[in-house]
Image: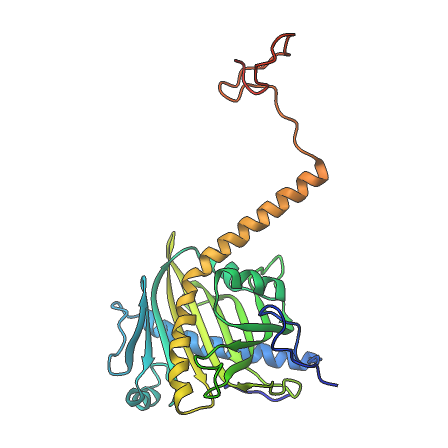
Amino acid sequence: MLWCCGSTSTFQPKMKGRFIVNPFQELNLTPADRTSLEDLANQCITTNLQLCMKYMSGSKRSVDPHHWKPLKEKERLRVYSERPEGAAAAAASGNEPTGSGLPMILCVGTMEGKLEDLLFGVISEDLETMRVKASYVDDFSGAAVLDAVVLPTLEDPFQSLVIKWMELDIPFHSTSLVKNRDYVYLEGTGYITTPQGERMGYHLLHSVNFPQTHALPSRIRGNLSIIGFWRQISPNNMEMYATGVMDPVDSGLVRKLVVPNMAYVFLSSLRYAYCGQMRKLSFMLDKAYTDSKQHGAPNRKSVCVTCSAPISGRKLGDFGKSNSTCK
């Protein structure tokens, strides 16, 4: 197996829908492979958590304007792109994230919602949950689940580590000028506890490569490393810190087109908590429906819905009276 930090199934680009079955051969991960993938994810999380805590330890939550260029803003989230001239200084200091010449995005700010709802909206460990998430958060154009390393449990319902494939549309991809980029990556979600004892949520996407994940027609395989952290700062508000590096395997037009796409993906996190709420509601409705099918509709109490007085049996001639009120 090859790591990238940075008979074969036929891929069908015209298949109905954006979510497809695995377009590659089975990965057949060994226990050692799974351990290596968990170690890789943990390394990415802990390294970036240190940079996150350095930013959040500042009272003003400011970014260096010489290092970061404002790119987009929505509600209370701000997205910046790394200035090429600021990358060298950041790499030398080690106190700030840097793409070291590759396109890099920084997203900081606050957003409404609860951390549990957000993680429930983020996690998508299989094809069905990916479909549900995409109905609220439209952050890619095509995707598939390749294998699972860690699946959620009753004890850790948000802990997940899954290998996926996704495709991102690039403007002008329908012409001969550019080709869409696709990615094979490790996706992790869950909670992490800071050295100060605070619980934070995270979402990691980090490129990996396997002998089975060959290049697909009409696409160029890119590399990415994206991670977001969230902490609850009030009953219905969270603080967000996220960074992302993408290697589009191009130094010209495509690189300029990829950065705005990255910004859009980061801002789509504003809908994660809402997605989580809707998934909870859907689960509760499904459960109530299943229970009603198993046990039947509950017996209605013979009391008035207005005043709770007992309703006696109806007499002959009471045809116009309701069975739910005493009138």
As drawn, 93 above or below 297 = below
Outermost front residue: 175
Q: Is residue 310 left or right of residue 85?
A: right
In the image: residue 243, left or right of residue 116: left
Compared to 204, does 247 lie above or below? below
Name, please, the residue furthest toward the right: 7
How is the model colour-coded?
rainbow
Q: Position of residue 153 (x, y in %)?
A: 63, 60
Residue 37: quadrant of the picture: bottom right
Q: Nearer the viewer, residue 255 or 271?
A: 255
**Residue 111 appears in view:** yes
Quadrant of the frame with the N terminus: bottom right
183, 38: nearer the viewer: 183
Q: Position of residue 211 (x, y in %)?
A: 65, 88
For residue 174, above or below residue 202: below
Residue at the limit of the structure toward the top, as seen here:
316
The number of numbered discs placed on residues in the rendered structure image is 0
Residue that appears at 54% across and 54% down: 279
Q: Foreground residue, 191 or 263?
A: 263
Toward the viewer: 245 or 116?
Answer: 245
